Amino acid sequence: MSDTEKYTLRQLAPLIQQGGKYRLFKPFLYNGQIFLNIEKILTESDLMRMEGKCFGPIEVVPAIEHNVNDRIRDSIAENCIKILKTSQLFHPSENSHLEFNKRKECEKIISGVIKGNAHLAQKLLEIYQFSKKLFIHSVNVSIFSFVITLGMQEKRKEHNALVLEEVFSAALLHDIGFLKLPKELTEKRRVDYSPEEVAIFKTYPVEGREIVLELSNVLRKRTIDFIYQHQERLNGSGFPQGLKGNTIDEMALVIGLADDFDLFLSKEITNSQKITASDIMSRLARSASFYGTDAVNSLYTWFRYLK
């Protein structure tokens, strides 16, 4: 996230007059109540309201405007939760489904991340408007990524809520670079791309990084790194940089595994129309050299019920 900047009200006023956009780093409290929240882009009127209530410098960060209100954010979050509750990937039968507690944790982070970050919600809205297919894939990958990461943390007897939030946010936006590519590439199965289309396709992590860098004041650096690196593979066979080993963030590999898992399930990256979820799990179980042993084991642990 962007570094905070400190200004007195007097110093900040001319910056806003000149077109600068800032929001508070922390909510401004007065008499125990929130006087201004962190999503509000400050105006000259806000500074006048703070006169006599604020003494000394205040912490602010450069702001990016967004066009999603609470109703839109609630709607996006509800659509994501609907996918979780109704998709056969997460609830294939009454006797075989993703563990209830994991599903509830997924619901909680979906609601918290989307409702808590208007700029991320806006990008999700843009993805939905661009391609419903891409939106559903992005939500599936975010849920897979979250559960895989949660399983890895449980095995390691640790719980890092910040990492879970970073992974989930990055997975939601991992394919945002497609917004800069011809739409027909999104609607076409990747296995059917021509060599020319493959070359264009391989630019999407770079395009995605450029898009999310504009949100660097509301997305953490690791989240942006995950988006950029999620097509890299441990053995160096990935793109766009061909990174190897520990030069790739482990959580980017998790998102890459979740991405490929959903693409296999939807027959996007295989010509075999008879391939089953069990076949895919068997194939991915032998792919530790691409994604890492812990990630692959966690995927198998939580999604082995798929047939």
Image (spheres, rainbow, N blue to C red):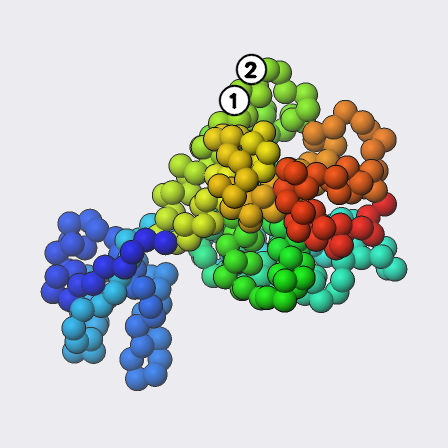
* SS assignment at label 2: helix
Badge 1 vs badge 2, beta-carbon distance below 8 Å: yes
* Marker disc for residue 183: none
Q: Nearer the viewer, residue 15 or 238?
A: 238
Q: Residue at x 83, y 52 (%)?
A: 305
Per the image, the residue denoted by label 2 is 196
Q: Quadrant of the C terminus?
A: top right
Gap between marks 1 and 2, in whole Å?
A: 7 Å
Viewer can see residue 262: no
For disc 1, the neighbor class at 10 Å (few under 14, some 14 to 19, many from 20) is some
For disc 2, the neighbor class at 10 Å (few under 14, some 14 to 19, many from 20) is few
Q: Residue at x 67, y 62 (%)?
A: 155
- The image quadrant that residue 37 belongs to is bottom left
Apparent side of residue 57 relative to residue 117 in the rendered image (left or right): left
Q: Residue at x 55, y 58 (%)?
A: 164
The location of residue 260, given as percent across then percent down, is 66, 38
Numbered marks: total: 2
Per the image, the residue denoted by label 1 is 200
Viewer can see residue 93: yes
User: Label 1 sits on what residue type?
Assistant: Ile
Apparent side of residue 16 relative to residue 218 in the rendered image (left or right): left
The location of residue 278, given as percent across then percent down, is 83, 42
- The image quadrant that residue 282 belongs to is top right
* SS assignment at label 1: helix
Q: Quadrant of the N terminus?
A: bottom left
Q: Nearer the viewer, residue 10 or 278?
A: 278
